[in-house]
Image: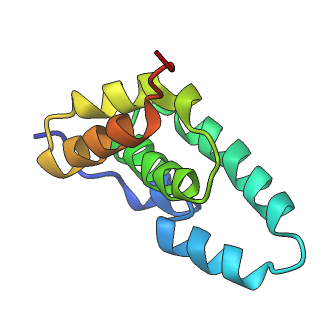
């Protein structure tokens, strides 16, 4: 199995818990806070580290449940699905199920 991420690579990343806490504490400017976090998530998804991508996908699936789209992150979900770690694979499969839009027939 690949090594766990180092403390320095994950020290400044926000977790899902940080995102939820931040949304609750930014009552007046929630949209601005979320848009800033989506920008951070987009940069996290470009990381070669599966753990970083998995963390970003967790946050995106939460935001998707709030009504934000995450279809633009479909390839990142497929990448995380290919991780050798089961816990990360599970996040990738969840993101793929929730985030991949089916066109209306």
**Along the horizontal axis of the image, is 61 left or right of 70?**
left
Residue pictured at 69% horizontal, 74% vertical: 23
Q: Is residue 11 above or below residue 20?
A: above
Q: Nearer the viewer, residue 87 or 64?
A: 64
Residue pictured at 56% horizontal, 41% vertical: 44
Q: Quadrant of residue 46?
A: top right
Residue pictured at 21% horizontal, 41% vertical: 89
| Position of residue 85 measured from the top left corner of the image (x, y, whole percent) | 15, 43
Q: Nearer the viewer, residue 104 or 22?
A: 104
Judged from this view, the residue extending furthest toward the front is 105
Labels in figure, total: 0
Judged from this view, the residue extending furthest toward the right is 28
Rendered-image quadrant of the N terminus: top left
| Position of residue 65 measured from the top left corner of the image (x, y, whole percent) | 52, 57
Q: Is residue 41 above or below residue 78?
A: below
| Position of residue 56 measured from the top left corner of the image (x, y, whole percent) | 49, 48
Residue 3 shows in this picture: no
Q: Nearer the viewer, residue 76 or 63?
A: 63
Residue 72 shows in this picture: yes
**Along the horizontal axis of the image, is 26 left or right of 23?**
right
Q: Nearer the viewer, residue 97 or 24?
A: 97
Judged from this view, the residue extending furthest toward the bottom is 25
Q: Quadrant of residue 2?
A: top left
Q: Is residue 86 above or below residue 49?
A: below
**Along the horizontal axis of the image, is 15 left or right of 51?**
right
**Along the horizontal axis of the image, is 96 left or right of 72?**
left
Coloring scheme used: rainbow
């Amino acid at each position: 199995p690949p090594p766990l991420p180092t403390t320095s690579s994950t020290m400044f990343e926000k977790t899902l818990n940080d995102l939820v806490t931040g949304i609750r504490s930014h009552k007046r400017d929630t949209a601005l806070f979320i848009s800033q976090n989506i920008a951070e998530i987009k940069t996290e998804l470009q990381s070669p580290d599966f753990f970083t991508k998995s963390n970003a996908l967790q946050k995106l699936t939460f935001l998707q449940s709030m009504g934000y789209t995450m279809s633009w992150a479909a390839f990142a979900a497929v990448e995380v699905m290919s991780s050798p770690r089961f816990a990360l694979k599970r996040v990738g499969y969840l993101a793929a199920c929730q985030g991949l839009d089916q066109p209306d027939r």
